[in-house]
């Protein structure tokens, strides 16, 4: 398993970079924020991304997919991280599509995946119920009724929760509140009666929502995987989401870092570029060293998804924990090394800082993944 | 000590009788009183509280009584501060006139300047801005370019200042200006007091990452400043500037322990947002981060105490030079810790789904990033320690 991108992946990266620079620069994200855009992303941009095949990047050709695997997705996510491009790529094309790929039956796949591949249908995962990522702490209930289920409960921090067409809801059909057993995944149309949505405005100005389910009735065809066996699908889906997000975080960190290094070369104080001060040089060099570690971890985790899934849990936790720390450190240093101008809204650096803090909480903070890694190691 | 105990009793009784109950609540930014011609009291109680404190001489307890201060010793002043903290009494008047300019003026100003400005500061009649930094002169403050030409009976000021906090709301600005370009950069700087209403001054607000717009760029276009507004001697402004920075850094060092905002303390946040099992936080990482922070704050508090005692007994140590660095870095750690503890609840920017306290925590987190830059960055604080405490060899400046 070579820890380098192949020709095709490098080409993808170059295309993605060029496309995003032209179509979704940081300025586009700033505009969405300033205009308090109702959708939270640019629908036209998403259509263009879909035309490039990004919506289907991990999907097999049979469903109209590009079939570039997770390394391909990682390349695109990373570039999106660089320009902070808002789109359903993560929630729908990475997480949602994975859930259907891993858990959907053949009818569901045949009906939905081509639509997802075309960017016409978007998904979101409705998982969290508290302010920390605790994927087994589920008390939303899915009670069998007739052929289908009745859903009751609340979800929070649902990325794209107000904009996605369908939600994959993690609910409990048996066992107690904190058990990985007894979870059921249900595909719920966002317009279903009884489902209410409160959009929340987060630090990164990206999409998130709180959802409420009051006697939401869904049919048997909405069940993803087997009732009560949801964890077997959810866990690998989360791991895929974690590595995809880690790729975005890499892009976010790299861009903030490169902009900072450029600033160190440009800004002069005491008659010299501030980058000539060793106090700053060493910190920049240490970040470069960290980036090298993260690069290896990220590549290994992305390729594990398709090649060695048995190693994915540990690698996903390693990647998410490492990238959490990298993106925190780099964005903090970026602001500090820019001095006064770094804390102005006019400068883009603050956007990287804010996006970083949100990504650090999605699908597990550093402590969560350290704990999981330790557990997987047997201590 | 006996006297101090008696004094404490007296202070306690007076505060009990005079501080309105509404002024014993945590304060939010709109509830702060900053004085000045454009300022107004956020509430009737805030006015009563301010006036009582002013009449008692406790707005500036350690300043001389002839300018409206309390004429008290450092120890007595500290007792007042402690007793106010004990009942959570609000700070009746905010402002850098009170915190920074006043002390510098008492040391370097002439009698006329003190008569005119010190009392006005205490009375909340003038609000001050700080005109130090320029686009090209931040950490290298002494390279500043804003010119003041000697025109015989006045100075003519041209140039701009940047990051001037609240300049658009201030009545006066104290400025470092270049009065000699022929000499070493520190030796051609003068310290001027400039009325913000003077013709030729304009301000442009700059928005911050916290979403607020607290600071400005301030432009001077042929502004005439009377000669009497020069503080200290011509071309000796650098000494005044440095003395003032000492007050600024002391203030910033202590800001964490005296936060004006209604944000939760990390311990409280932990109780509210984390799970406990048998009295222990179950999240090992956050428990460890929390104890690191608390131990650091404990040590910082003891060091503040020690520096006070050292000063009172005439002992010198390196501690005061480290406090701005330590205090503002700890503030950043605290804000990051609060976000980590609050999880997704700490990430709300505005609107529904979050409490005001949660939203404030995020805004304050964003602002905390500025504190290790303003008033001399952390790097500059460390350079000062390396140079003046450790006497390490310095690289020749180009
Ligand atoms: C919230 C806020 C409020 C402020 N309010 C005011 C105000 O009211 N009035 C006012 O005059 N100014 C104010 N300032 C400005 C503040 O004093 C400057 O931002 C500060 O001095 C840094 O200067 P700079 O922004 O130009 O950064 P630079 O000096 O350009 O610094 C950029 C980076 O280089 C580092 N650096 C610079 N020199 C060295 C060195 N020799 N060794 C190692 N590292 C170095 C810095 O530490 C920083 O990380 C405020 C700033 C902030 C953030």
Image (tube, rainbow, N blue to C red):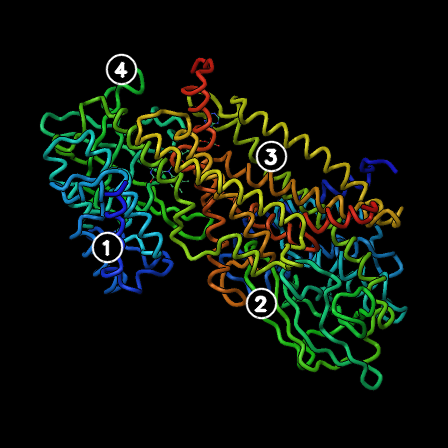
> What distance separates the C-alpha of mark 3 from that of mark 4?
39 Å
Mark 1 C-beta closer than 8 Å to ligand 1: no
Residue A199 badge = 2
Secondary structure state at the residue bearing disc 1: loop
Residue hosting label 1: B39
Residue A258 badge = 3
Q: Quadrant of ligand 1?
A: top left
Q: Residues within 10 Å of mark 3 (few under 14, many from 20)?
A: some
Callouts 3 and 4 on one subunit: no
- Quadrant in the picture for residue B373: top left
Q: Chain of mark 2?
A: A
* Mark closer to the chain start, 2 or 3: 2
Secondary structure state at the residue bearing disc 2: strand
Residue at the image position 63 percent from the left and 55 percent from the top: A86
Q: Could you say which is closer to the camera, residue A252 or residue B87?
A: B87
Q: Could you say which is closer to the camera, residue B235 or residue B196?
A: B235
Q: Could you say which is closer to the camera, residue B180 or residue A87?
A: B180
Q: Chain of mark 3?
A: A
Label 2 close to label 4 by CB (< 8 Å)? no
Q: Chain of mark 4?
A: B
Residue A353 badge = none
Q: Is residue A101 above or below residue B286?
A: below
Label 3 close to label 1 by CB (< 8 Å)? no
Tell me if residue A253 can be seen. Answer: yes
Instruction: Give percent across and percent down for residue A208.
Output: 61, 62
**Which is in the foreground here, disc 3 or disc 1?**
1
**Position of residue B67 in the picture relative to residue A197 (left or right):** left
């Amino acid at each position: 398993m070579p820890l380098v991108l192949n020709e095709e992946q490098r080409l993808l990266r170059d295309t993605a970079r060029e496309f995003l620079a032209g179509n979704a620069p940081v300025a586009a994200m700033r505009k969405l924020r300033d205009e308090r855009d109702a959708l939270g992303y640019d629908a036209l941009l998403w259509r263009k991304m879909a035309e490039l095949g990004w919506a289907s990047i991990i999907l097999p050709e049979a469903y109209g997919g590009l079939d570039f695997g997770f390394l391909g997705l990682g390349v695109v996510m990373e570039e999106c991280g660089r320009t902070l491009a808002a789109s359903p790529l993560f929630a729908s094309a990475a997480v949602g599509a994975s859930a259907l790929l891993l858990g959907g039956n053949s009818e569901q796949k045949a009906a939905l995946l081509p639509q997802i591949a075309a960017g016409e249908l978007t998904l979101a995962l409705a998982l969290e119920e508290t302010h920390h990522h605790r994927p087994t702490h589920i008390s939303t209930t899915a009670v069998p009724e007739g052929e289908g289920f009745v859903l009751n409960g609340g979800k929070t921090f649902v990325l794209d929760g107000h904009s996605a067409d369908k939600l994959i809801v993690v609910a409990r059909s048996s066992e107690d509140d904190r058990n990985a057993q007894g979870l059921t995944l249900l595909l719920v149309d966002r317009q279903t009666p009884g489902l209410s949505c409160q959009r929340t405005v987060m630090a990164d100005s990206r999409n998130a929502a709180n959802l409420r389910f009051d006697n939401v009735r869904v049919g048997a065809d909405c069940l993803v995987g087997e009732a009560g066996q949801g964890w077997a699908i959810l866990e690998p889906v989360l791991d895929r989401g974690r590595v995809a997000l880690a790729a975005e975080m890499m892009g976010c960190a790299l861009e903030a870092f490169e902009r900072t290094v450029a600033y160190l070369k440009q800004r002069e104080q005491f008659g010299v570029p501030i980058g000539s001060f060793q106090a700053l040089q060493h910190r920049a060099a240490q970040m470069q060293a960290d980036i090298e570690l993260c690069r290896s971890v990220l590549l290994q985790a992305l390729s594990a998804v398709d090649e060695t899934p048995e190693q994915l849990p540990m690698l996903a936790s390693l990647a998410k924990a490492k990238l959490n720390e990298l993106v925190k450190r780099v964005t903090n240093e970026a602001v500090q090394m820019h001095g006064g101008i770094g804390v102005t809204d006019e400068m883009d650096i603050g956007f990287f800082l804010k996006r970083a803090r949100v990504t650090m909480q999605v699908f597990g903070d550093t402590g969560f993944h350290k704990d999981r890694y330790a557990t997987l190691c047997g201590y | 000590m006996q006297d101090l105990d008696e004094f404490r009793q007296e202070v306690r009784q007076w505060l009990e009788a005079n501080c309105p109950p509404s002024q014993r609540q945590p304060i939010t930014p709109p509830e702060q009183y900053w004085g000045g011609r454009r300022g107004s009291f956020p509430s009737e109680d805030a006015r009563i509280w301010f006036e009582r404190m002013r009449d008692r001489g406790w707005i500036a307890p350690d300043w001389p009584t002839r300018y409206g201060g309390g004429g008290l010793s450092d120890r007595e002043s500290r007792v007042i501060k402690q007793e106010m903290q004990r009942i959570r009494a609000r700070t009746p008047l905010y402002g850098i006139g009170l915190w920074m300019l006043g002390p510098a003026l008492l040391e370097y100003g002439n009698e006329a300047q003190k008569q005119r400005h010190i009392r006005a500061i205490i009375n909340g009649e003038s609000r001050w801005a700080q005109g130090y930094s320029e686009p090209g002169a931040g950490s290298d403050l002494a390279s500043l370019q804003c010119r003041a030409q000697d025109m015989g009976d006045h100075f003519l000021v041209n140039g701009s200042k940047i990051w001037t906090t609240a300049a658009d709301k201030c009545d006066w600005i104290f400025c470092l200006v270049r009065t000699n370009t022929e000499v070493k950069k520190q030796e051609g700087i003068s310290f001027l007091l400039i009325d913000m209403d003077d013709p030729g001054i304009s301000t442009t607000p700059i928005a911050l990452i916290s979403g607020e717009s607290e600071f400005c760029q301030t432009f001077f276009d042929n502004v005439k400043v009377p000669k009497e507004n020069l503080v200290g001697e011509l071309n000796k402004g650098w000494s005044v500037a440095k003395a003032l920075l000492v007050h600024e850094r002391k203030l910033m060092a202590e800001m964490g322990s005296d936060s004006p905002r209604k944000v939760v303390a990390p311990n409280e946040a932990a109780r509210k947002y984390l799970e406990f099992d048998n009295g222990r936080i179950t999240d090992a990482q956050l428990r460890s981060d929390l104890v690191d922070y608390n131990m650091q704050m404990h040590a910082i508090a003891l060091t503040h105490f020690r520096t006070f005692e050292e000063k009172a007994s005439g002992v010198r140590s390196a501690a005061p030079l480290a406090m701005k660095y330590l205090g503002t870095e700890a503030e950043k750690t605290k804000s990051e810790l609060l976000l980590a503890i609050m999880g997704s609840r700490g990430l709300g920017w505005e609107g529904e789904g979050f409490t005001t306290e949660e939203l404030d925590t995020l805004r304050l987190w964003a602002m905390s990033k500025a504190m290790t830059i303003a008033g001399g960055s952390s790097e500059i604080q460390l350079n000062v320690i390396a140079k003046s405490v450790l006497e390490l060899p310095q690289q020749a400046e180009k």
